[in-house]
């Protein structure tokens, strides 16, 4: 067996698809992890991977993450991801994305895709010319537009669940949040928080973004490497993955970690470290699901009110994670994985029951002919 089939077997991936169209220079990989709950949904990433192996591993890893995110959010979606091997600054063309759209279409609804690193709404609209299995369209095309405001709204719901668990109150007023990254999500989060009289101390490597947040929202700026040592109630990582690690954890005086960045724990064992230090960690894929909920709503006809209403459920999803962590005495990161397994296994069992739908529908169709 190859390293890839080994990985697929280890993590239970269903399908790995290699896509090539030499005429337009497309080389892409689509990974479908688990479709127990529904069609696999995950963005398409464009990245100049050095090797095909690197691209495949990334697609497999990201697809698995999407299964967890959708399952924990209570959505009827599975997990998948696509990667296009190429440079997003120099290799983009209408033909390339339309070719990609045709590959997505060929999967007949098993895979739905949208934006990820290196892809923007124009690329999605080229794919949309060839397939309806895309999300993240502009508002003009009936899409949900920029999801980051919904992601930030979800973070606030999650923070409330955290403060209730840690301090016995879901009010954020008067607390201090250390915010890393003042980009799309970070800026909206800072706005929500300052509107609720939360003190925000923020940082970004881009001075322009820091200035905007200071001028428009009145946040207190610090240098990027000072963020980890702050005396703040909550740390909100909204920039990079892997920032909870052996180097940063000993610096933490935070009580709660709740932010949007994906894959915040550098390794699983760092979740155990946080538990030992009594720092309450909101697992990233549970608290940052607002963007995914936003595109899910798009599938059924976009409605911002509905997206925000559904995003409020992040509060309850985290509450359930904390209950599992307490009951089973495990770190919250492991408790979230258990919540995911529970939901997928329950739905698997449900599917054992024959509902007669297909036979019924067949008869109905025959009668109408
Ligand atoms: P973004 O690129 O708009 O913002 C990230 C910001 O982090 C940038 O301003 C960047 O300059 C800054 N940054 C990078 N390295 C830094 C460092 N070392 N210290 C301080 N700042 C640094 O991205 P975004 O859309 O705001 O997403 C933020 C994170 O949340 C990403 O990890 C993303 O994967 C994740 N996420 C985003 C969404 C969404 O709806 N946009 C949904 C789920 C998860």
Image: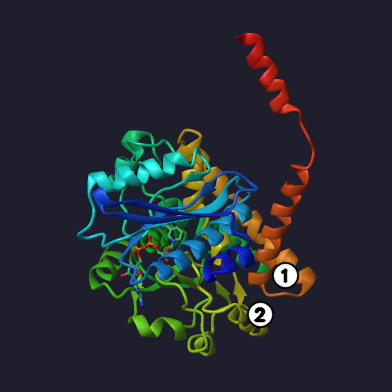
> Does 71 appear above or below 250?
above
> Does 215 appear above or below 247?
above
Quadrant of the image for the N terminus?
bottom right
Mark 2 and ligand 1: say if the CB distance to the nearest ligand atom is below 8 Å. Answer: no
**Residue 198 in view:** no
User: Which numbered disc flags the more N-terminal residue, 2 or 1?
Assistant: 2
Q: Are marks 2 and 1 in contact (CB under 8 Å)?
A: yes
Horizontal side of residue 129 vs 133, given as left or right: left
Please identify the quarter of the rendering in which residue 314 is found.
bottom right
Foreground residue among 346 and 143: 346
Mark 1 and ligand 1: say if the CB distance to the nearest ligand atom is below 8 Å. Answer: no
Which residue was labeled with disc 1? Answer: 325
> Does 316 appear above or below 108?
below
Quadrant of the image for the C terminus?
top right
x and y percentages locating residue 103 in the rendered image? 40, 44
Horizontal side of residue 120 vs 323, given as left or right: left
Residue at coordinates 44% horizontally, 47% vertically from top-left?
113
**Residue 106 in view:** yes
x and y percentages locating residue 282 in the rendered image? 59, 68
Foreground residue among 338 and 302: 338
x and y percentages locating residue 93 in the rendered image? 22, 49
> Does 225 appear above or below 73?
below
The numbered dot on residue 24 is none
Instruction: Check disc 1 and report its element: helix, strand or loop.
Output: helix
Please identify the quarter of the rendering in which residue 207 is found.
bottom left
The residue lying furthest to the front in this view is 1
Instruction: Check disc 2 and report its element: helix, strand or loop.
Output: helix
* Quarter of the rendered image showing ligand 1: bottom left
Please identify the quarter of the rendering in which residue 65 is found.
bottom right
Calculate the distance from the C-alpha at mark 2 to the C-alpha at mark 1: 10 Å
Which residue was labeled with disc 2? Answer: 275
């Amino acid at each position: 067996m190859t390293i890839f089939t080994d990985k697929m077997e280890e993590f239970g991936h269903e399908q790995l698809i290699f896509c090539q169209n030499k005429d337009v220079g497309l080389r892409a990989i689509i990974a479908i992890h688990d479709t127990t709950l529904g069609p696999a949904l995950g963005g398409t990433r464009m990245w100049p991977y050095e090797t095909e192996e690197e691209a495949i591993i990334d697609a497999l890893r990201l697809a698995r993450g999407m299964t967890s995110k959708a399952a924990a959010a209570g959505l009827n979606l599975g997990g998948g991801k696509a990667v296009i091997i190429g440079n997003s600054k120099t290799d983009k063309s209408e033909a390339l994305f339309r070719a990609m759209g045709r590959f997505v279409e060929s999967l007949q609804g098993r895979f739905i895709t949208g934006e990820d690193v290196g892809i923007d709404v124009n690329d999605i609209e080229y794919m949309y010319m060839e397939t309806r299995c895309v999300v993240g369209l502009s508002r003009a095309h009936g899409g949900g537009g920029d999801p980051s405001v919904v992601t930030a709204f979800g973070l606030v719901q999650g923070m409330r669940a955290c403060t209730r668990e840690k301090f016995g109150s879901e009010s954020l007023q008067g607390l201090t949040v250390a915010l890393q990254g003042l980009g799309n999500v970070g800026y909206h989060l800072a706005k929500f928080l300052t509107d609720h009289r939360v003190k925000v101390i923020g940082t970004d490597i881009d001075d322009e973004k820091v200035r905007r947040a200071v001028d428009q929202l009145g946040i207190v700026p610090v240098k990027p490497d000072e963020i980890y040592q702050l005396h703040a109630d909550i740390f909100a990582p909204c920039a990079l993955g892997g920032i909870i690690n052996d180097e940063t954890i000993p610096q933490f005086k935070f009580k709660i970690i709740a932010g949007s960045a994906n894959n915040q724990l550098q390794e699983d064992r760092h979740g155990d470290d946080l538990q030992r230090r009594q720092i309450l960690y909101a697992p990233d894929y549970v608290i940052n699901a607002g963007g995914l909920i936003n595109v899910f709503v798009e599938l059924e006809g976009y409605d911002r009110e509905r997206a925000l209403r559904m995003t409020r459920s992040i509060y309850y999803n985290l509450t359930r994670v904390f209950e599992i962590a307490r009951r089973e005495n495990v770190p919250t990161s492991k408790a979230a994985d258990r919540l995911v397994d529970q939901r997928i296994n329950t739905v698997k069992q449900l599917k054992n029951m024959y509902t007669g739908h297909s036979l019924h529908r067949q008869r109905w169709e025959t009668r109408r002919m």
